[in-house]
Amino acid sequence: MNHPSPLTLLLERMGIESVDKSVGTTSASSARASWHHWKEKPNSKKVLSAKWAVQAAVRRGDIKRPKRCSKCGKVGPVIFHHTHGHDEANKLKGRFVCAACHSKIDGARNGKKMSQSMKEAKNRE
């Protein structure tokens, strides 16, 4: 079984699309270019700081990572969605959701059409 490298996993978590998912390898130059493009975004330092704060809180046991998505209930890997932004005061405010729900939430936040279930979820927050 071919396991992805730690760099591949990190790039996937950051949403960098240059990862060749079929073989789990990354072109070094394309990965570097994607990373430089991503880190130039205005809030990238805040985003990374917030992600690392959640990871540290999970390791310490301050936050328990659930086994299911808090939005759809699907059992499997979950991602922490920062519901109140990435500012210092809001680093640990959010919920764990699956990748599909996280994409839907981020898509709706970025101006894409929001489904009825998304509107209901947003109203509950």
Image (cartoon, helix red, strand yellow):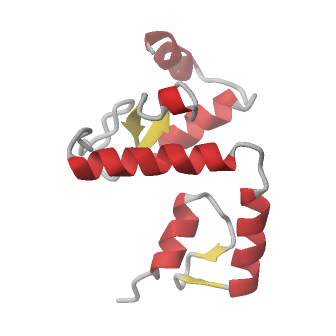
Residue sitting at x 52%, y 82%:
24
Toward the bottom, the furthest residue is 1
Residue found farthest to the front: 88
Q: Nearer the viewer, residue 24 or 94?
A: 94
In the visual, does 43 lie left or right of 66?
right
Report x, y in % for residue 63.
26, 39
How many numbered discs, if any?
Answer: 0
**Above or below — where is 19 with respect to 43?**
below
Identity of the residue drawn at 34% across and 50% down: 56
Residue at the top extreme, as displayed: 123
Quadrant placement of the N terminus: bottom left
Q: Position of residue 113 (x, y in %)?
A: 71, 26
Indicate the quadrant containing the C terminus: top left, top right, bottom left or bottom right. top left
Q: Is residue 78 visible?
A: no
Q: Nearer the viewer, residue 43 or 80?
A: 43
Identify the residue at image location x=56%, y=16%. Answer: 119
The x and y percentages for residue 79 are 42, 46
Q: Left or right of 34: which side holds 83?
A: left
Query: Residue at the spot x=52%, y=77% of the render?
Result: 7
Residue 48 spot, x, y in % from top left = 56, 51
Q: Using the image, determine if residue 79 lies above or below residue 89.
A: below
Between residues 64 and 121, which one lies in front from this camera angle?
64
Q: Report if residue 50 is visible in the image.
A: yes
Horizontal relation, residue 50 to residue 60: left or right: right
Q: Is residue 122 above or below residue 53?
A: above
